[in-house]
Image (spheres, rainbow, N blue to C red):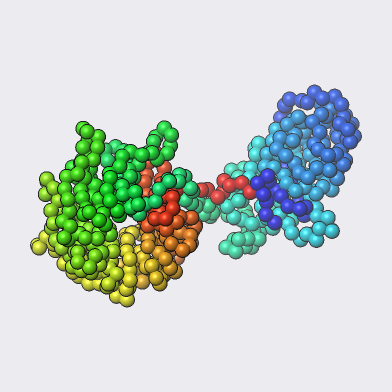
Amino acid sequence: MGLSDRGWRGRTLPFLVIAVSVISADGLRVRQPRCPFGCTCTKDNALCENVRSVPHTFPPDVVSLSFVKTGFSGITGGSFVHTPVLQLLLFTGNSFDFIDEDAFMGLPHLEYLYVFIHFQPKESLAYNNLETLPRDVFSGMEALTKVDLRGNNLICDCKLKWLVEWMHHTNATLDEIYCSGPPSYQGKRLNDLLPHSFDCITSEFASYQSLKFESISVEAFTFGMDQYVVFAQPFAGTCNFLEWDHVEMTFRTYDTIESTSTVVCKPMVIDNHLFVIVAQLFGGSHIYKRDVSANKFIKIQDIDILKIRKPNDIETFMIEGESYFVIADSSKAGSTTVYKWNGNGFYSHQSLHHWYRDTDVEYLVISNKAHLILSSSSQRPVIYQWNRSQNQFERRTDIPDMEDVFSVKHFHVKGELFICLTRFIGDSKVMRWDGAMFKELQTFPSRGSMVFQPVSIGKWQYAILGSDYSLTQVYQWDAKKGQFVPSQELNIQAPRSFSVLFVDSRVFLLASSFKGKTQIYEHLIIDLSNSTF
């Protein structure tokens, strides 16, 4: 039987005994002289029956307090701070719905605590025992010598990790208690478990900021000592730059580059200078440079419109200290082209693909050699390898049985190389490099997907599968299974790309949206053992 956020909750609870022994010490005495209504008091004892709440006035010498058939549904926090000299506290014949975790705080002299809770026969719950306990229910009782928790079916999960930690730091003893779940711990003794037996750390992406514009690409980058984000806005025809406001803790507008039918705004930092490659469907593509003294972007170069007719993706990289970028061209007459920085500008270095309608290009290192993977709507993904002597890329092979791949993105797990392949129709896939070829590892239903983006954040590896027809699926890498498992769903309209920004010891996931508001999520680490129930 589970418990809610106030403590032990349910309809009524089965027979439960909690016996506590504490070494007595002198303390403050309550100065209320009268016995409360509904209670019977002697010199040092008080018995309350059918009372509606825990009274706050008892004679100063009362050290033993009993409640029988109470009329209140639970024990709230701080109920006994007015009776700090109590040595014995007993509840019997009660039907509590909850006991707050700090219900017994302020009782430094308490020697015995008995809570007898039972089900009424009419409830038909006679065999439904407690499954968990509120966190820190024994807080403030540092001198415990005996705790009796028999008669319960405890679920030994993260909600009880606190109890295992407490057991290893207290002098109190517990009778043998066996776990009734989860399956991995069923039948094991709670006394034998160790705190590190529990894997309670998880993560999630929480909605942080919604931006009132559509976007088709997003790139996070660092320039100088600051972090920025740039979104390509095709309908507005701009590259929209945002910066992190360290005071307001939000993303705000930094600058814009006006353009036409913008599909990619790719930042590139060379020798502390910021360049932005702006790819447009109409009017040609251009390169801008940030003029720091004038605090604005200045167009420095046009890109050959005969080669780049319909750009779809841009990738930047360095080989042997030289800076390059490559533009995937998706037209029938254009050519995917590599450009190289010569110290003054960028010039066409190599044309890779003529008339293949490339949709995506990915730079990666395989076996210590630079490679490019080109995705195309007309053929299977093609792998190119850098030839050092020729100072160019050479076609090496393709990825078999993978037609209609929209994009390829790579990631690493423990030194192994993987790729995510996005397909709009059919299944998207994860493949692993086996030393000679990429082999299929896992498939994902992906109707309407135009982005399958691997994201690495610290020890966490994700793959985010967007869709035009359903919720975005976040998968998390399971090291034991060696594959991705479902983790979370995000509501993003027609996502096209994702990027991660690290700033002020926080991590943000930036999500472009082609048909709705661009979204920003914060990556949160959650300790399930600290959660309330």
- Specify the quadrant that holds the N terminus: bottom right
205 or 505, nearer to the observer: 205
Query: Quadrant location of residue 90?
Result: top right
- Of 128 and 491, the residue lying toward us: 491
Whether residue 141 can be seen here: no
Tell whether 513 sits left or right of 270: right
Total numbered labels placed on residues in the image? 0
In this image, 41 relative to 379: left or right? right
Please identify the residue farthest to the bottom as the structure is shown.
Answer: 401
The spot of residue 200 in percent (x, y) is 53, 52
Residue sticking out furthest to the left = 389
User: Where is 463 relative to 219, above or below?
Assistant: below
Residue 421 appears at what percent x and percent y? 35, 66
**Residue at left offset 81%, top offset 29%:** 57
Residue sitting at x 39%, y 51%: 214
Asked if 22 appears above or below 321 in the picture, the reply is: above
Residue at the (27%, 44%) spot, across then down: 257
Horizontal placement of 146 versus 256: left or right? Answer: right
Query: 373 or 461, which lies in front?
Result: 373
Q: Is residue 246 above or below residue 429?
A: above
x then y, percent, for residue 122: 84, 58
Image coords of residue 64 (percent x, y): 82, 35
Identified at 31% across, 39% down, the residue is 255
Image quadrant assignment for residue 330:
bottom left
123 vs 310, left or right, is right
Q: Can residue 55 be seen from the camera position used here?
A: yes
